């Protein structure tokens, strides 16, 4: 019995179902990049050159905390049943990137709150500040690292092939963090920190080129998205690195480019 | 039948009365952290679905809806054969699929003589060859090359289930029968299991915001009953039992079908592959899996996790080291 070659049944349909992730999740992924990027770069600066970075760090930690809180609100509101958000903490399951991420975010939020409080109320003790930084660093890093892997370890079209998504997200987060802090330092008149952050921004953007290209190819991003992200996240901020007055433009370009890339990412399965 | 009546006679345990507002809040907060005693493991049970005998009656769909008190889907016209369910979802845990494998053009040429095909006898000649009363044959039964494929789809109860791997609340567990079960009082609707399932089984309910799918009639199994869908299936297309037994039965049936000339008959999901575990709900198919809406070669997304983390951490650490180097080396007085 030879079936007709035209009778393909359900073969033309995508088998998987997209999760109900839309705008709030785009914001979640974006805010995750901003809070971890800002914190990580500020913490490294604060530990390496405390005097130069003190004025920037005083703003960076409260900013990272505010963005983290906004991120957590997005995470909770996006649940099918937000009143059950605490169920996330009933198990610790490192094999699930979402579980690992929730625990990392929770652990990151505690020392970050301490650092933000110290910054806001001017408590800067010799041991407490670096201790909080050292505790927060690995959890902040974990909070950035889990996000891309959360998407790439799914069965969804686009995400399932994106082996470099995690590396793209984390390098992009660091570049965004450095860019935002550079603009902040310029605004605060912290010229030594601004000079350092300018070069850090450029270096981190260049480091992110390889994972971004690999991710775009695997993900099969649309041409429009590729052009917009290339210009906003790479070309424009690199050109502006030579112009200190344009720090805010570079920071905004990095933020908008990062948002466009993440919006394309989150909505990809809905297009299949 | 007696076993069914026993169950209703036994009643159900009374729920704790909620003691006031504060009690309710405390219960809401603490209840998910309570742990019971895990039941003793039993031999793994599952389904063997023999699609070669499915007649598309949808008794399984109806039985599942009735037993689990699932709402209707709106009776939409999908335009796809007799399939008015469309897909598995939080409200439809069984989905009977229909594939019409008919060579429509050939049929038309044969049945409408002189209609452009030019292969059939003209109407008058055909009338001459008809029985003595001169009437045209009313034979509308398709020739043997044409066929229907029908299949009752359901959760595959994967031995290593990506949905269970993904679930951050621990709502998805393997129960004592080795079935993949979503605890409805634990799920918070994060939807990660939906993204993880390579078979598109789970969705989030519009009613309560939680993820739902086939429970493999855990409640019925606990009471020694056969799942409602298998019980309702009139052709034994859906067979329930210990997985090891089902595998033997299925292998025999494939041999039998091959001997009868169905060379394409094969089992789907009865054995693990390099990229995916065995399925506790596996199928006998007569065509490529994709024709039935199944992935030809399913991949467990978790096979990539280690490498994905490695690349992420390597580039993240490189970024931090680069930042540190810039901060330590740049702008220092020579
Ligand atoms: S088929 Fe999907 S929902 Fe069912 S157990 Fe496997 S991964 Fe989970
Ligand atoms: S939606 Fe529910 S069952 Fe699915 S992963 Fe989230 S908590 Fe688990
Ligand atoms: S086993 Fe029970 S829950 Fe699963 S499809 Fe059959 S009737 Fe529905």
Image (cartoon, coloured by chain):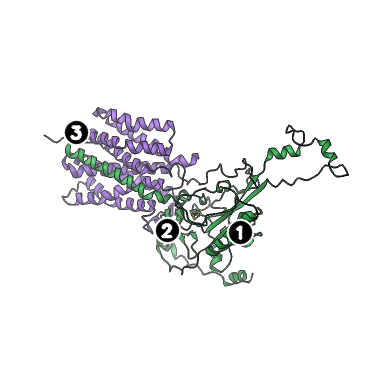
Helix, strand or loop at disc 1? helix
Callouts 2 and 1 in the same chain: yes
Q: Is residue B258 above or below residue A55?
A: below
Q: Give the labeled residue for mark 3.
A: A191
* Mark 2 lies on residue: B170
- Calculate the distance from the C-alpha at mark 2 to the C-alpha at mark 3: 50 Å
Q: Looking at the colours in the rendered structure, which chain would you say is drawn in purple?
A: A
Specify few, some or many for label 1: CA neighbours under 10 Å numbering under 14, 14-19, or 20 or more: some
Residue carrying label 1:
B253
- Mark 2 CB near ligand 2 (8 Å cut): yes
Picture colour for chain B: green
Q: Position of residue B264 (x, y in %)?
A: 60, 50
Of marks 2 and 3, the one in the foreground: 2
Mark 3 chain = A
Say few, some or many: other residues with alpha carbon within 10 Å of mark 2 (under 14 / 14 to 19 / 20 or more). many
Per the model, the C-alpha gap separating discs 2 and 1 is 38 Å
Distance of label 1 from label 3 (alpha carbons): 79 Å
Which residue is at a point 53% across and 67% down the rendered structure image? B222
Instruction: Return the residue nearer the eye: B172 or B125.
Output: B125
Work out whether disc 1 and disc 3 sit on a shared chain: no
């Amino acid at each position: 019995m030879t079936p007709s070659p035209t009778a393909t049944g359900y073969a033309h349909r995508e088998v998987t179902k997209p999760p109900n992730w839309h705008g709030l999740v785009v914001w979640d992924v974006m805010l995750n990049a901003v809070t971890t990027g800002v914190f990580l770069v500020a913490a490294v600066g604060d530990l390496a050159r405390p005097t130069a970075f003190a004025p920037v760090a005083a703003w960076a930690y409260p900013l990272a905390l505010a963005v983290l809180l906004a991120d957590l609100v997005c995470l909770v509101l996006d649940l099918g049943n937000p009143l059950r958000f605490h169920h996330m903490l009933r198990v610790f399951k490192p094999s699930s990137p979402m579980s690992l991420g929730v625990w990392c975010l929770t652990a990151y939020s505690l020392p970050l709150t301490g650092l933000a409080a110290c910054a806001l109320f001017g408590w800067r003790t010799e041991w407490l500040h670096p201790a909080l930084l050292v505790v927060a660093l690995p959890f902040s890093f974990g909070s950035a690292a889990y996000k891309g892997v959360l998407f790439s370890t799914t069965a969804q079209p686009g995400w399932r092939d994106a082996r470099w998504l995690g590396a793209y997200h984390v390098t992009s987060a660091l570049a965004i963090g450095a860019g935002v802090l550079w603009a902040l330092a310029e605004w605060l008149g912290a010229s030594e920190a601004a000079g350092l952050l300018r070069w850090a921004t450029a270096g981190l953007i260049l480091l992110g080129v390889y994972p971004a290209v690999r991710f775009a190819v695997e993900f099969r991003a649309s041409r429009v998205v590729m052009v917009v992200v290339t210009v906003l996240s790479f070309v424009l901020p690199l050109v502006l690195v030579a112009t200190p007055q344009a720090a805010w433009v570079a920071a905004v370009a990095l933020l908008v480019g990062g948002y466009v890339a993440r919006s394309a990412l989150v909505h990809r399965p809905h297009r299949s | 039948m007696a076993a069914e009546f026993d169950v209703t006679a036994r009643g159900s345990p009374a729920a704790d009365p909620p003691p006031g507002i504060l009690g309710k809040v405390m219960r809401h907060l603490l209840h998910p952290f309570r742990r019971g005693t895990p039941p003793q493991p039993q031999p793994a049970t599952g389904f063997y679905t023999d699609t070669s005998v499915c007649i598309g009656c949808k008794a399984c769909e109806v039985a599942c809806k009735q037993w689990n008190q699932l709402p209707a889907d709106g009776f939409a016209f999908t335009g796809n054969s007799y399939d008015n369910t469309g897909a598995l979802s939080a409200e439809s845990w069984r989905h009977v699929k229909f594939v019409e494998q008919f060579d429509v053009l050939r049929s038309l040429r044969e049945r409408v003589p002189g209609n452009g095909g030019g292969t059939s006898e003209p109407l008058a000649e055909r009338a001459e060859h008809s029985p003595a009363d001169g009437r045209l044959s009313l034979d509308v039964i398709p020739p043997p090359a044409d066929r229907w494929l029908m299949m009752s789809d359901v959760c595959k109860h994967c031995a290593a289930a990506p949905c269970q791997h993904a679930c951050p609340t621990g709502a998805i567990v393997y129960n004592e029968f080795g079935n993949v079960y979503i605890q409805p009082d634990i799920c918070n609707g994060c939807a990660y299991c939906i993204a993880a399932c390579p078979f598109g089984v789970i969705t989030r309910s519009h009613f309560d915001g939680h993820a739902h799918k086939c429970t493999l009639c855990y409640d019925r199994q606990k009471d020694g009953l056969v799942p409602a869908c298998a019980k309702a299936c009139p052709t034994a297309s859906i067979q329930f039992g210990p997985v090891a037994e089902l595998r033997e039965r299925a292998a025999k049936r494939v041999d039998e079908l091959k001997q009868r000339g169905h060379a394409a008959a094969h089992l789907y999901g009865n054995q693990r592959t390099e990229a995916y575990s065995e399925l506790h709900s596996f199928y006998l198919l007569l065509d490529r899996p994709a024709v039935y809406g199944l992935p030809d070669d399913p991949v467990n997304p978790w096979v990539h996790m280690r490498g994905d983390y490695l690349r992420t951490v390597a580039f993240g650490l490189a970024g931090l080291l680069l930042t540190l180097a810039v901060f330590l080396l740049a702008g220092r007085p020579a």
